Image (cartoon, rainbow, N blue to C red):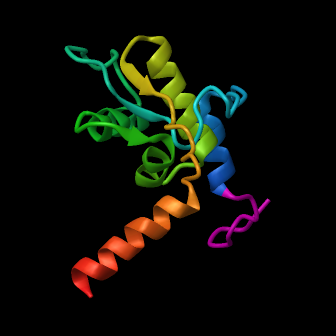
Amino acid sequence: MTAPGEESSVSSGFVRSYVITGGRGLPDADDLSLVTLVTLAPDRQPPPSPSPEVKAIWELCSGGYLSVAEVAGHLGLPVGVARLLLQDLNQQGHLLRRKAPPPAQLVDRKILEEVLHGLQVRFG
């Protein structure tokens, strides 16, 4: 027990995350990866009595697609907690998701050299 005016050694960040998630376990990273893009589904109303975090997600995602990592960063929440809140909204039909774009394919070195040569000829 701490005396009045002393700091507790327990991090409030852990307690806050536990309260926000309701003690539920975090979802798999495969379902909503860091680069999965999310936005609000058209013509949806916010859920009844949303938490402050859900209200913030609603405002953030109403402007267009954001990645899961961006949502977590804007909210100042751990990614797992943001992922759980987004998954809840997705299961309720409030979110649209886009999978991450596929990794870029390697381009043939000869094509890149030709483009570079063309740029050097054109712009010196």
Query: What's the residue at 44%, 21% (across, down)?
Result: 89
User: For the magenta stretch, what is the residue range?
Assistant: 1-11
Say whether residue 39 is left or right of residue 114.
Answer: left
Quadrant (top left/top right/bottom left/bottom right) for the N terminus: bottom right
Q: Residue furthest right?
A: 1
Say whether residue 122 is left or right of residue 79.
Answer: left
- Number of numbered callouts drawn: 0
Q: Nearer the viewer, residue 4 or 45?
A: 45
Q: Residue furthest bottom?
A: 124
Q: Is residue 56 magenta?
A: no
Q: Residue furthest left?
A: 43
Q: Is residue 3 magenta?
A: yes
Residue 93 position within the rendered picture, expressed as x and y whole percent measured from the top left: 40, 11
Residue 56 position within the rendered picture, expressed as x and y whole percent measured from the top left: 34, 40
Q: Nearer the viewer, residue 11 or 83?
A: 83
Q: Nearer the viewer, residue 106 or 57?
A: 106
Q: Quadrant of residue 2?
A: bottom right
Residue 32 position within the rendered picture, expressed as x and y whole percent measured from the top left: 58, 31
Above or below 109: residue 79: above
Query: What's the residue at 67%, 30% (across, down)?
Result: 30
Above or below 51: residue 74: below
Quadrant (top left/top right/bottom left/bottom right) for the C terminus: bottom left
Query: What's the residue at 57%, 46% (across, down)?
Result: 105
Query: What's the residue at 37%, 25% (across, down)?
Result: 50
Residue 20 position within the rendered picture, expressed as x and y whole percent measured from the top left: 56, 35
Above or below 17: residue 74: below
Magenta highlight: main SS: loop
